[in-house]
Amino acid sequence: MIAKLRGIIDQISEDYIIIDVSGVGYLVYCSSKVLNKLSNKGQTDEILIQTIVREDQITLYGFKEENEKYWFDLLLKVQGVGAKTAIKGLSIMTPEELEMAILSEDKTSLTRIPGIGNKGALRICSELKDKTLNLSIQTTSSPKQNSNIQDLISGLIGLGYGHQEAYEVVSKLSDEDKNKKVEEMLQISLKIISEKRK
């Protein structure tokens, strides 16, 4: 499998590039956001690759950051979401915007992605919510912090708030808030919920 390519940008099109690596031109599909980050034609650049193998073809998809590649793979896990839809999704929304939309079940934002209707948006939310929450927790700075956030979520659910609301509150906490005690985080979370309902 090809994981990364480094070479000369030979051609830049609307949704793909051709990158010349030692005389071999690789066609790589990219999101519009990735295309905007690439070097100009004729210059050397490096791009992360996800290889999709089908019975009749091998297709390469390119990314500038690991986070983009991770979200591409994550979207492919959703029933009915193919590689072309996933790459279009990353043209419309950043990984951070996707994360927020899924945690808050913002189906309207997800339907901005070409090929995703209401049912598709619902599937994305339901199938990726737990994975997205785990990602949010894993990107915190310490095991203790992770444990505190899990306790916070359990506490909010225990108070009668739904999973969706608990997830949304967690995504809005600052890094500074996440370093506080569970009791303090709970007070901040309840304040966020109260202000949201005004």
Image (cartoon, helix red, strand yellow):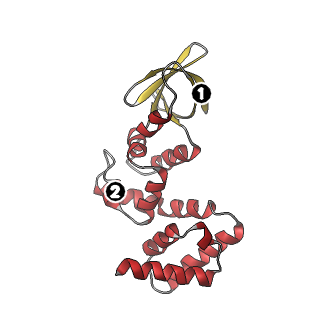
Name the spot of residue 65 as percent of width and height, x first. Answer: 56, 42
Name the spot of residue 51 as percent of width and height, x first. Answer: 53, 33
Front in this rendered view, residue 85 or 127: 85
Front in this rendered view, residue 34 or 30: 34
Name, please, the residue furthest toward the left: 117
Name the spot of residue 95 as percent of width and height, x first. Answer: 48, 51
Q: Which residue is at 68% across, 63% downward?
A: 141
Name, please, the residue furthest toward the bottom: 159
Helix, strand or loop for disc 2: helix
Name the spot of residue 20 as percent of width and height, x first. Answer: 55, 18
Q: Which residue is at 37% across, 29% downward?
A: 14
Q: Which residue is at 45% across, 31% downward?
A: 29
Say which residue label 1 marks.
5
Residue 56 in sight: no
Say which residue label 2 marks.
109
**Image quadrant for the C terminus?**
bottom left
Helix, strand or loop for disc 1: strand
Front in this rendered view, residue 153 or 79: 153
Query: Mark 1 belongs to which amino acid?
Result: Leu
Q: Which residue is at 31% across, 59% downward?
A: 108
Can you say whether 69 is above or below 10 in the image?
below
Query: Mark 2 belongs to which amino acid?
Result: Ser
Q: CA distance from mark 1 to mark 2?
A: 32 Å
**32 relative to 4 in the view: left or right:** left
Whether tag 1 and tag 2 are in contact, CB under 8 A, the answer is no
